[in-house]
Image (spheres, helix red, strand yellow):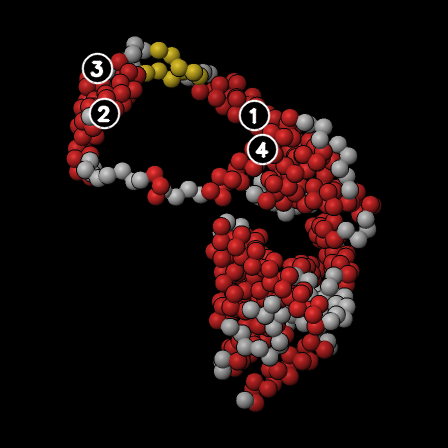
Amino acid sequence: MLALLLAVIVFAVAVFVLLPLLRPRSAGLAAGQYDQAVYRDQLRELDRDVARGVLTEAEAASARLEVQRRLLAAAATPDRAARTGRSPVAAAVVGLIVAGGSVGLYLRIGAPAMPDMPFASRTIDTRTEQIAQALVRLKQAAEADPKNAQGWLNYGRALAELNQWSLAADALKHAVDLGQDGADVMAAYGELLTLAAGGSVVPAARAAFAHALAKDPAQQTARYYSALAMGQDGQPAKAIEMLQALLADLPADAPERADIALRIADAAKAAGIPAPALAPGKAAPPSSPQGDAQQQAMIRGMVDGLAAKLAANPNDLDGWLRLGRAYAVLNEGGKAADAYKHAIALKPGDVGVLQQAAQGMLSNQPATAPITADQLDILRQIEALTPGQPAVLWYLGLAAAQGGRPGEARVYWGRLLKTLPPDGEEAKTLTAAIGALREN
């Protein structure tokens, strides 16, 4: 039976391959027609980007002119129809190669005596299958009842969990149009538009954030991205002011502070000024020992749940970054380093990921704590990609000083000193530290 089955398969493949060689000559489609179809599709895509707010009309205009120019050039090019010729000799040669090669290859590497794998022992990625099925059900529910705003909202949130930003934004747009325009929904919609645009706060996203802040001036997501928009508009000082105000409204131990601190450092660098001292957050209200224990147990449960989720879905970059920050807040440096290593491996060479890892690992430890090998490796990667970051220079110098390498420490801190105002307290402190190195 196996030999017969193989013979049938070889015959079917040979017929599929040989028929074009045995047909009479016939004209194919013109090459120019394909080009024109591609250019028309590009024009439609530009219109869709403008409608979604990803591009402004001015930004799309130059791209549209170039595509139209290519379309006219393709239309003016004479058609060159593809032709195939009848070739019995070539058909015979190809047939021998297909049949003989298939049999020879199977005799060399095949294993006809090997038993089949029992069905019960086969593994299936049930979680991926369950997510896909749930997504299909949510989509079907939304399309079956297109006036149900909650259905579109649920579908959009599910898409966002899978990092399908554009589709998620479209789903939330349906929900917004149907009246789901609360502050949190509008902020989520604006964030999805921003993520779909690669981090650029596009006009439609800005409008969504403005709408959210009009309903709730304290909405944190809208405040955060509105500050980023200021930085993208060339107003880093305003961006720093808005981010500092957001920090002041967050709890002192909020994990979001690490990312906001990085944004402030980036804005300060863009403005050509030293990174300011971060605004202190709100102190946690006093609580009983029992309440503290319950809170710690709740936090531990959330962290363990996130770790279990990442074990099943190890490609979730944002999830690993959140887990790293959570472990850092819990003073579990080894676990934080492992989580950040997973994140860096998913996006190697990305400065933003490396900066989040460095900030998360270093911001929660005492100033006198030793720089670990994992932290030093991340700092060196950042320095190689974007040399001269003040915080990185400080920690690299500190690591060198701790490791008994005063000459290396002086190099890093000397570079840092050149970036500081000469009369400032930071410059005086750093000068004293460099002097102490010389004395030792």
| Figure quadrant of residue 433 | bottom right
Using the numbered discs, state the Cα–Cα distance from disc 3 to disc 1 in whole angstroms: 40 Å
Using the numbered discs, state the Cα–Cα distance from disc 2 to disc 4 in whole angstroms: 40 Å
> Which residue carries the number 1 mark?
41
Circle 3 Cα neighbour tier, 10 Å, few/some/many (<14 / 14–19 / ≥20): few
Mark 2 vs mark 1: in front: 2
Indicate which disc, 4 or 3, sits on the residue closer to the N terminus: 3
- Return the residue nearer the eye: 215 or 144: 144
Indicate which disc, 2 or 3, sits on the residue closer to the N terminus: 2
Three-letter residue code for mark 2 = Leu
Using the numbered discs, state the Cα–Cα distance from disc 4 to disc 3 in whole angstroms: 53 Å
Indicate which disc, 2 or 4, sits on the residue closer to the N terminus: 2
Indicate which disc, 2 or 1, sits on the residue closer to the N terminus: 2
Circle 4 Cα neighbour tier, 10 Å, few/some/many (<14 / 14–19 / ≥20): few
Q: Position of residue 368 (x, y in %)?
A: 60, 79
Contact (CB < 8 A) between labels 2 and 1? no
> Which residue carries the number 2 mark?
5
State the residue at coordinates (56%, 86%). Answer: 438
Mark 4 vs mark 1: in front: 4
Indicate which disc, 3 or 1, sits on the residue closer to the N terminus: 1
- In the picture, the disc for residue 88 is 3
